[in-house]
Amino acid sequence: MSANKWGDGMLTERQLFILRVLIDDYIKHVEPVGSRTISKREDITYSPATIRNELADLEDLGFLEKTHTSSGRIPSEKGYRFYVDHLLPSLSVSHNKMDRSELLFTEKVHEAEVLFDQSARILSDLTNYTSVVLGPNALDMKLRHMQIIPLSSQMAVAIFVTNTGHVENRQILLPDSIEPSDLEKLVNILNERLAGVRLIELNSRIHLELADVFKKNLKNYQNMGVFLDQLLLWSKKEKLFYGGKTNMLSQPEFRDLDKVRPLLDFLETQDLMEKLVSSSEKGVTVKIGTENEHEAMRNCSVINASYTMHGKHIGTISLIGPTRMEYKKVISLLDSLSKEMTNRLNDFS
Amino acid sequence: MSANKWGDGMLTERQLFILRVLIDDYIKHVEPVGSRTISKREDITYSPATIRNELADLEDLGFLEKTHTSSGRIPSEKGYRFYVDHLLPSLSVSHNKMDRSELLFTEKVHEAEVLFDQSARILSDLTNYTSVVLGPNALDMKLRHMQIIPLSSQMAVAIFVTNTGHVENRQILLPDSIEPSDLEKLVNILNERLAGVRLIELNSRIHLELADVFKKNLKNYQNMGVFLDQLLLWSKKEKLFYGGKTNMLSQPEFRDLDKVRPLLDFLETQDLMEKLVSSSEKGVTVKIGTENEHEAMRNCSVINASYTMHGKHIGTISLIGPTRMEYKKVISLLDSLSKEMTNRLNDFS
DNA sequence: ATTTAGCACTCGTTGTTCATGAGTGCTAAC
DNA sequence: GTTAGCACTCATGAACAACGAGTGCTAAAT
């Protein structure tokens, strides 16, 4: 109740210092930190009692918590938030990290999926947390070439190649009414008129621009509507690449099976995960505990970094770990790794 | 030491009965079963003491084990083996199961991958164990059509469509020396000559049969070798579909984190899993504990059923659970589910 | 010759008590 | 403003007893 006449907004130098030391210690040892422990540091000149007073204040301000009445303190969510926003030792020192991670990539990769897979693996190996790469949405890529290859009188497979070399394919039912020659014409028209259009937009472009062309060239245009919809109606097509899925199990805070089960279930749930690691922001973002807005993540933090291709944000690489994460190490690592990914992606041509 | 003058090979009716009852009970309650428990069953006329004698004999024969000197008995691996081979109530009763599982498929599926995915999910939902579908090896499918689509002057994407409608694709580096017209000719020759050949055999067939044709038609055949190898050298391409990956966590025998961790790690290791669920045998097979030949599986059983297409065995659907599995339920379920898969696959055309 | 009752014995489980020690908050002195 | 001192809290772990489910063995009953 003593210091801090400025209310919530301002902390004394000493408070900042103690808060940082405490969180550093807790991140390292995963045990409530007491006044004695802090006072034993060589760069601390105050007695445990003084520190106790400061700790009590920091607790009142919401940065710290106790696990029981006479325990040491642990950081609260707000504490971590403050730590990440204001107390993190400056992040620029870390170029040696990148050199190391660069080495871990196998020689030359020219397929994006392999790159994503490797990145996720490297990241989880380096951190012992769980990593996820959210791949680019194939539907945002531009059509390079499409083709329909008949399998039988009724079935065919439709193939879409994007400018990035990604291949989307789906099996489709051919309408009875369609003639082979019409099918061929259709494919030709699509290739001529729609090359360079994003896959997701193909359908609407057809309705807007190509109705006339179709009417002119195709015999059975009336019955074609359903077929075209089947051909071009996409479901979401993002892909997740995981690394270290079971690393959660080695985190002391998840020693308990009942704690870890919802977590692992969460990791397996595609749409929740996509939502979790999707981010429109550039650079590295940190979401702590309940900021992730899902019960299963209440004790986890998610660090998110976006990678780009030709300057466009196309996906993210993320790390999921306990709220007590090695933020310093991890943020700089993620920063350089995402940049490395961007570099390699742009090398693809 | 009394009964069983016939040595290992023969058990008395009463021993068989007691063994079956005990294993049934253990499977249900996951707790060592004592003589009293068995004697309390209404269809048992013997006293606990008598049963104790039998249990001691069954233990001597290796079918049962004790967890400590004065505990009840649990089945040994040999016990389970015997139970599965000789004591399982006849398996044919179970057609109601299949009806139910049939209902769980969403209406009409015409893409194999979706079918596999659904099958795995249904199986794990129905059993609360972990299920795996080993998809067909795409490389065993026959070439329907191939194509090479240039992305840039150096890169192209090669696409192979199989008779089953599956699409394999890979990005390739174009050799400097190749001319567009030669590339086109190459593709034409491959399509004409190699349609119907299994993907895995493409490369050898080229070397055996097409060398001459190439020499005649292509200008730069000498430098083509590396390119063809790059184009047609496959890495293994089986795919696993999982259901209920975390179900292991709810099995009481794996309450312990240190027990479950190696298991989950095992599940995530592609090649180990492929080996585990690969089986050349038709029908349903059961592997118990160490029969699976991997440390992490020492306390697990794997039930394996193969599905076929046009009479050919092309993949498996498997269930992984604790050695104490509900074998009866699970075997018949797997049997009908694999048959259902076979049916649906053959409906594809 | 089986079967069974009786009994001593084993051992895991549960709950109690107790000592320990790391931590706190508060007060009074520095 | 700082710190020493002290009473108090609470988690942890060890020691111990009571309990009960189970066993094996022996001797009596069938």
Image: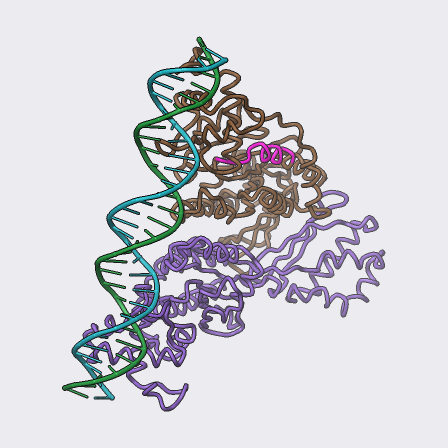
Chain colours: A purple, B brown, C green, D cyan
Q: Judge by depth and name the residue closer to the eye, A70 or B279.
A: A70
Q: Is residue B161 visible?
A: no
Location of residue A27 by image quarter: bottom left
Q: Residue B167 in magenta? A: no
**In the image, which residues are magenta?**
B324-336
Location of residue B240 by image quarter: top right
Q: Is residue A91 above or below residue B282?
A: below
Q: Is residue A329 above or below residue B141?
A: below
- The residue depicted at 52 percent of the width and 33 percent of the height is B25
Q: Judge by depth and name the residue closer to the eye, D23 or A104.
A: D23
Q: Judge by depth and name the residue closer to the eye, B192 or B273.
A: B273
- The residue depicted at 37 percent of the width and 74 percent of the height is A64
- The residue depicted at 57 percent of the width and 26 percent of the height is B88
Q: In this view, does A197 lie above or below B183?
A: below
The C terminus of chain B, quarter of image: top right
Side (left or right) of A331 relative to B187: left
The N terminus of chain B, quarter of image: top left
Q: Where is residue A123 in the image (x, y as percent from the top left)?
A: 40, 60
Side (left or right) of B70 relative to B222: left
- The residue depicted at 62 percent of the width and 55 percent of the height is A168
Q: Position of residue A293 (x, y in %)?
A: 53, 68
